Image (cartoon, rainbow, N blue to C red):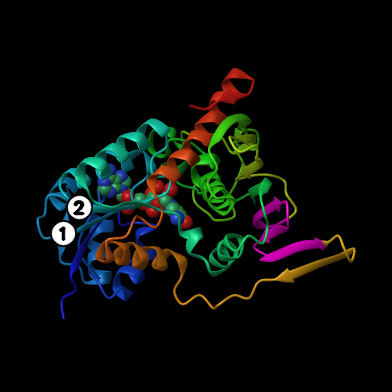
Amino acid sequence: MAKQLKVGVIGVGGIANTHMPGWATSEYTEVVAGSDVDPKILSDWGKKYEVKRLYDKSEELINDPSIDIIDVCTPSSYHEALSIAALKAGKHVLCEKPLAPTPEAVRHMIAARDASGKLLMTAQHMRFQGESKAMKAEILTGALGNIYHARGWMLRRAAFPGRTSFVQKRHSGGGACIDIGVHVLDLTLWLMGNPKPIAVSGVSRTELAKNPKVFTVWGGANPPEGWDVEEFASAFVRFENGATLILEVSWLLHHDTPGEDRQIWLYGTDGGAHLPKCEIFQTNVETKQLYNRTLQLTKDINPPHAQECIEFAQAIVEGKPSPVPPEESLQVMSILDGVYRSQEAGREIRLD
Ligand SMILES: NC(=O)c1ccc[n+]([C@@H]2O[C@H](COP(=O)([O-])OP(=O)(O)OC[C@H]3O[C@@H](n4cnc5c(N)ncnc54)[C@H](O)[C@@H]3O)[C@@H](O)[C@H]2O)c1
């Protein structure tokens, strides 16, 4: 039986493939069309998923009246224009992270969302991992009390995406900050309850990628041509409620862990927490006992990239708000923009 929400995907070469199981699993959605600037990628994708309507021009897909949801999976610099066009055409939009590489662009997208009355969601798949959901639920019980400090890092060793779409600013809008900083920052802010950021002191730089022999364990060009983005960033963020955050991201650090080390530490008045260990740390001052406990996880039913699509469709059908509100992505991008501006100015930057 035909499902009620028809999905069109734009930019089908990479991450879009991880969304396809979600659209197929949801009881509400089916993918009916795709678009890509690369005709070979588009036709291979069409064959693989048996999608017949293939558009070489994204405007044609966006204006296809039978489509209800546009799934934007292009390199980041194109998210703004495509999402706004889709919202104007009356479609709901799921857009890959970052929603857009600048706060200004995100504001434009929020304005288009408001004018359209449709849902706009950022595909922050890490919020849909079982351990993230368990930690969020635990925090909502008040287990940590007032979270006044956090540390979040996503550090890769010799592991940058070996594609020009990630390392040329005109496609990506930035480097490690925009690619992976967005993930760890979004997750940390969400767990902290999205306090309002007010100031950032940060650095963003390229060190190891200056070496023309630098390589990535993931393959691809070493390094891709025209690299003009940062590989590393570190920042200290202040929030309106007095909380603070230390952030570190890198694609290329001489770190001990092969591949990726991603950790979030949260410190509150009643307890601390760690992801991905999914542990809570508490102290009983009456008995002087220190105790740690591991949260029970329900097994992930779907991979997180699929689950985000399923929950987006569900929100549309049930008339609920976007599962990842663009306003929260605006906080993320304001902080990362603050890191870049702080690097340039050589001092702490106040955020609007
Ligand atoms: N959530 C995650 O874990 C995750 C992982 C990887 C990438 N991403 C995000 O997904 C987006 C795409 O990344 P990717 O790895 O799939 O990149 P990619 O470069 O591998 O693929 C993007 C696809 O978009 C196509 N394309 C480029 N410009 C286009 C345009 N203007 N219109 C239509 N199609 C266009 C390309 O031909 C390619 O097929 C980026 O925003 C990235 O940040 C998210």
Disc 2 residue crowd, few under 14, some 14–19, many 20+, Cα 10 Å: many
Residue 48: image tag = none
Front residue of 42/347: it is 347
Q: How many marks?
A: 2
Residue 17 painted magenta: no
Q: Earlier in the sequence, mark 1 or mark 2?
A: 1
- Classify 47 as above or below 256: below
Q: Is residue 18 left or right of residue 293?
A: left
Q: What kind of element bears circle 1? A: loop
Report the residue that reaches farthest toward the top: 345
The three-letter code of the residue at mark 1 reads: Ile
Residue bearing mark 1: 67
Residue 37, percent from left and from top = 25, 48
Residue 157 makes an appearance in the image: no
Report the residue that reaches farthest toward the left: 65
Residue 254, percent from left and from top = 72, 46
Q: Are marks 1 and 2 in contact (CB under 8 Å)?
A: yes
Residue 159, percent from left and from top = 59, 51
User: Which range is magenta?
Assistant: 257-283
Report the residue that reaches farthest toward the bottom: 1
Give the spatial CA distance, label 1 vs label 2.
Answer: 7 Å
Q: Residue at x 59, y 75 (%)?
A: 297
Indicate if the residue with disc 2 has its beta carbon within 8 Å of ligand 1.
no
Residue 276 painted magenta: yes
Residue 158, percent from left and from top = 63, 49
The three-letter code of the residue at mark 2 reads: Lys
Residue bearing mark 2: 91
Q: Main secondary structure of the magenta part?
A: strand
Report the residue that reaches farthest toward the right: 288
User: In front: mark 1 or mark 2?
Assistant: 2
Front residue of 288/161: it is 288
